[in-house]
Image (cartoon, rainbow, N blue to C red):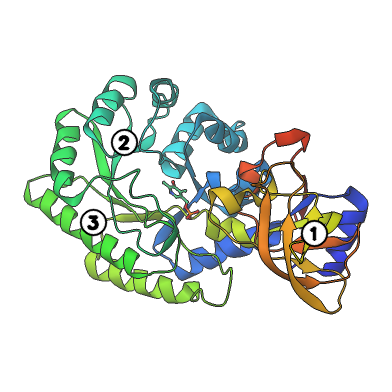
Amino acid sequence: MITTETLQHLAETHGTPLFVIDHDEIRSNYATFKNNLPRVQAYYAVKANPDPEIVKTLFEAGASFDISSIAEFETVFENIKDLSEQEQHDWIWKNIIYANPIKAEDTLRTLNKYKPLVTFDNREEISKIKECAPDAGVVLRLRVSNAGAMVELSSKFGAAHDEALELIFEAIDAGLHMEGLSFHVGSQTTNFENYMQAINMAALIFKEVAERGYDKMNLLDIGGGFPAPYDESVKPFSELAKRINNELDRLFPNGVDIVAEPGRFIAATAGTAVSKIIGKAVRHGKLCYYINDGVYHTFSGVIFDHCQYHFDAFKTGPTQICTVFGPTCDGLDVISMTEELPSDLARGDLLTSKNIGAYSNATSTYFNGFPPATIVHVNR
Ligand SMILES: *Cc1c(COP(=O)(O)O)cnc(C)c1O
């Protein structure tokens, strides 16, 4: 935990808007994930927060990585660039999954020399992989229930249960190395049933594939979606982990490697934004604070991630429900319309926002000439 004093000191030293990343928290979330899911190898989903220092901390902690672009591959590769070529190849095979089911041809061609592990979910992708990355290992992404997730992914990706067998054997017949199955239950999934249903569907498909005579599938990737503790309504991770462990032990007793792709769970609680009040007005009878960070910047998750962030003021005093606006001229730049904040905050006062480490600075822009917040790493 970063103290209020530390945040205040960092803001004085570096100015605002500030985005503070606590590496102790990154390490602690990774350890919590590993300790609660001992059978599961964690591939950090780099897109949640691609900061190279986060990737480095996780690399040093022994994590593997889920990447979805060449730029993300290069961020991870930076950590193994001094290894021999053979060691690089071995490390990549064991520790990287390219989990974007739709890949550009040149991406596949660039990755092919590393014999990458890649996902697919449709027929077109099989012929593309065969043509551009014939040495890849392939994993079929299933379409599973995303009910109750904050961010749903099932309308864009995933093969339905009744298409799965056909696609698996088409990939095998095309000469691809068919390694296993993956799914994603939707990001910030607080409905734990999604995981149970998806694991059960995957087990059925493993069985059907074995019955048809193919016994080389040995990987189950249970994806991301593990919820960050944004508020008290999110049940403890240990509860979800216990249910996943029970289901894995029941349905995948041995022989199958289990991996996961946590993004938000690792990064969310490690980020804190510190912003400054730059303007104050009363509109339609409501107090409005204008701050120097907004939805085009660190608070981009309000738009892209459907995430609601809350503020704490350093000052105390009688409060009221306020609106907090970002600094740009766009009417979309509204961070929150229902923040309970002290009424007498003044220009120059600071606000902090916790649990903003995932899908935040990752999607920040330079819109309207306002640059992204300065990033500061603590406990690196
Ligand atoms: C975004 C994504 C993740 C990470 O999801 P979280 O909900 O942040 O854990 C994992 N796998 C894939 C394929 C993704 O697209």
Q: Give me the residue at 80% from left, 53% from top.
A: 291
Rate crowding at label 2 as few (under 14), some (14 to 19) or many (20 or more) other CA atoms within 10 Å.
Answer: many
The residue at which mark 2 appears reads as 137
Q: CA distance from mark 1 to mark 2?
A: 52 Å
Label 3 sits on what residue type? Answer: Ala
Q: Which quadrant holds residue 159?
A: top left
Label 1 sits on what residue type? Answer: Tyr
Q: CA distance from mark 3 to mark 2?
A: 18 Å
The residue at which mark 3 appears reads as 202
Mark earlier in primary sequence (1, 3): 3
Rate crowding at label 1 as few (under 14), some (14 to 19) or many (20 or more) other CA atoms within 10 Å.
Answer: many
Left or right: residue 50 versus residue 372 is left
Q: Is residue 134 visible?
A: no
In percent of width and height, residue 72 lies at 55, 36
Q: What number is the disc on residue 72?
A: none
What is the secondary structure assignment of the residue under circle 3?
helix
